[in-house]
Image: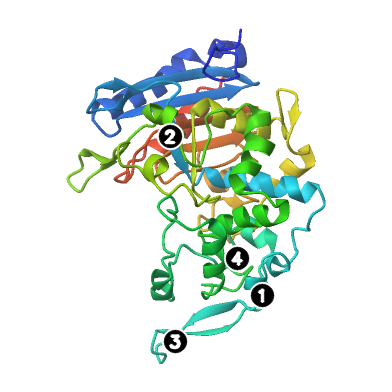
Amino acid sequence: MPLTGIGQFTQVEPESVGLSSERLDRLEQLIQQHIGQEKMAGINTLILRNGKAAYFKSHGLMNIEEERPMGKDAIFRIASMSKAVTSVAVMMLYEEGHFQLNDPLHNYIPEFKNAVVAIPDSTADQGYRTEPAKRPITIRHLLTHTSGLTYGDGVANEAYEKADLTGWYFADKEQPIGHWIKQLAELPLHAHPGDQWQYGYSTDVLGYFVEVISDMPLDDFFNKRIFEPLGMEDTHFFLPPEKSSRLAPVYGINDNGELELMEPTSTTDYIHGPRTTFSGGAGLLSTITDYGSFMQMLLNGGEFNGTRILSPKTVQLMHANHTGDMYAWGDLGFGLGFKVIEDLGKYGELGSKGAYGWGSAYYPTYWIDPKTDMAFLFLTQLMPGGGLPFRDIFKNMVYQSVIE
């Protein structure tokens, strides 16, 4: 029967969906080891196969200082895992015929019309010169992180710093996202659009793009078009006060290699901040079952529990490799919002051709694997991670448990 109050999935014995309980004990031991060694405070883990929860557990503490156990309904900052939601929103509007993927961005956000690129030049006072972009930024460039936009990294970093546009964090800002995107349009790109894969503000631009196309604030669009239809009741940009006790504090590995409280709930901007800037790139909070529902929708080809969000053909396009060998990690490709395993031998780790996913600055990661009909993730709050290799080993521990 469905699990009451903790998601929309039926929990089953692993063997009933082709996983080994004995082999999943290796994952259990790995988690316990990291918590016992105080490398993380607590963690929620969910493995879905054939639409059922084969592994769904909480470990450790949500709050060390209060000795509060991690609950399955804990709420986490998911940072860049927000990018998948924004990418889906963009593709929903694409399916409605509002634009083509190769349309110039400036058709919808005119401030980007005369984009320039910063070129290193030691003879220039600021260390770079600018030249007109060879081609306009397109919607596809934004979805694939080939727009030339970074998080301020590059030769024009000082200009980004002056504009208060470095890093991915917007929760403390008082102006709406459109203000910041228009400011961003005045800054030089760090590559010609289409020439390089560079991680940065592309998905925040897409969040504002969704607002422009839909004539709705991004939080309203997400709520009405994605979260409510999928039953994602605990996914928000900023947390309602009545849910504040469920938000996990952020811990991190300090310079001494010790676990330290980095952001307590009592001061977080996600509860106490201005609550005005909706960051499509890194702004959402969610639970493991909410995000599991979102992942299952993608795994099902755009549908979940009788609600269709996207066409299967659109989802297929999203996890195709659109960037060739351009992605920063050359053993993977990159699609419309996700990294993609294109060649398993080249990738060289456990996985499947066509599996796709991403992660979060707070350390969580997720994978969606159409070939094995699996979606799996863990959520924790660990920043900085101190070079901890857990998330890569986690993926291997899930795959080694597959016996059918």
Considering every residue shown, the one lying at the far bottom of the view is: 123
Q: Who comes first in sequence, dot 1 or dot 3?
A: 1
Query: Can residue 372 be seen from the camera position used here?
Result: no
Which amino acid type corresponds to the residue marked 2 in the rendered image? Phe
User: Mark 3 — residue?
Assistant: 121
Q: Identity of the amino acid at label 4?
A: Ser
Residue placed most toward the observer, 307 or 318: 307
Q: Residue at x 64, y 21 (%)?
A: 51
Q: Where residue 30 appears, x then y in whole percent?
A: 35, 26
Q: CA–CA distance between discs 4 and 1?
A: 13 Å
Find out whether the residues at labels 1 and 2 contact each other: C-beta distance under 8 Å. Answer: no
Q: Earlier in the sequence, mark 3 or mark 2?
A: 2
Percent x, y for residue 337?
Answer: 61, 49
Q: Which residue is mark 4?
A: 147
Which of pointers 1 and 2 lies earlier in the amino acid sequence?
2
Q: Are marks 1 and 3 in contact (CB under 8 Å)?
A: no
Q: Quadrant of residue 197?
A: bottom right
Q: CA distance from mark 4 to mark 3?
A: 21 Å
**Which image quarter: residue 67?**
top left
The amino acid marked with disc number 3 is Asp
Nearer the camera: disc 4 or disc 1: 1
Report the residue marked by disc 1. Answer: 113
Q: Quadrant of residue 107?
A: bottom right
Residue topped by disc 2? 76
Sequence-first disc among 2 and 4: 2
Q: Residue at horizontal 50%, vertical 24%?
A: 46
- Tag 4 secondary structure: loop
In whole angstroms, how far apart are the C-alphas of marks 1 and 2?
Answer: 37 Å
